[in-house]
Image: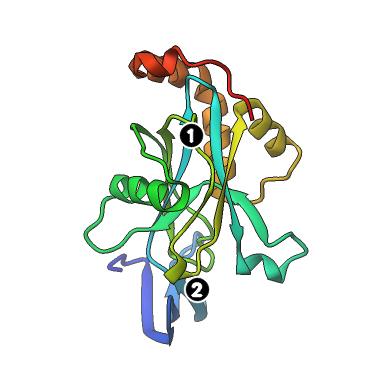
Amino acid sequence: MSDPRVEILDRSVVFDGHFQMVRYRLRHWQFGGGFGPLLVREVFARGHAVAVLPYDPVRDEVVLVEQFRAGALETDCDPWLLETVAGIIEDGESAEAVARREAREEAGLELLDLAPVCSCFMSPGGSSEIVHVFIGRIETAAAAGIFGLPDEGEDIKVHVLPFAKAQALLDEGQLRVAHTVLALQWLARHHEVLRARWRAAAPARALESGPRCD
């Protein structure tokens, strides 16, 4: 940080485990002029992440994954949450490469194309994380199963939903993860344009496939 509007008096790592917690002592420039009072703030430093909503434009279906999330234990929510595929960007990786890797690891899916949605902070008051959100083109004909990396404690179930059903879950308030809400809202706004573009790029065998029967 080299912004002259922020005076960092001290930065220390107060926890260093799977993630880091950093404590700042700082002052910042105020809208009325001059530097404000001393602030002490802890920041959850977990790197940056990618979230991708897999979407089949031919069948008009999306894939959401369900897994246990410890953060929900501090709330009255069910800790098994429906969300997009997501993962942390490691050193040297691009956001697009992470999207493709996580789609394979978490859902057994190969992404055929990517449409960027946004790059945004999830909770900038206390976390440094930026999430890069995408829609990923897939074929859902064989999408199903339980995935994840056992050595990382992952136990992830794939759900294939008609786009309209996913939108209904969103409207009913049953989807509680921010990047999932963002991705579905973006897809709703751009649904017809994106679907037409990706259907034009879909292989003939996908276009000729019949309706899904579960």
Location of residue 34 by image quarter: bottom left
Give whichever of 77, 20 is nearer the camera.
77
Q: Residue at x 71, y 32 (%)?
A: 168
Estimate the x, y position of residue 197 in percent, counting from the top left.
39, 16
Q: Which mark is residue 142?
A: 1
Which secondary structure, mark 1?
loop
Residue 107 in percent (x, y) is at: 47, 47
Residue beneath label 2, please? 36
Residue 144 seen in the figure: yes
Q: Residue at x 44, y 76 (%)?
A: 27
Q: 22 or 49: nearer the eye?
A: 49
Position above or below: 140 against 11 = above
- Note whether 85 is above or below 165 in the view shown: below
Query: Is 144 above or below relative to 4?
Result: above
**Which structural element holds mark 2?**
loop
How has the structure been colored for display? Answer: rainbow
Task: From the top left corner, tell me how far across and down residue 37 is, in percent.
Answer: 52, 78
Q: Determine whether, in the image, residue 96 is placed left or right of residue 128.
A: left
Amino acid found under the numbered disc labelled 2: Gly
**Residue 69 percent across, percent down from the top left:** 60, 64
First in sequence: mark 1 or mark 2?
2
Residue at 47% over, 73% down? 43
All told, the count of numbered labels is 2
For residue 14, which quarter of the picture?
bottom left
How many neighbours does mark 1 have within 10 angstroms: few (below 14), some (14-19), or many (20 or more)? Answer: few
Amino acid on which disc 1 is placed: Ala
Q: Which label number is shown at residue 2?
A: none
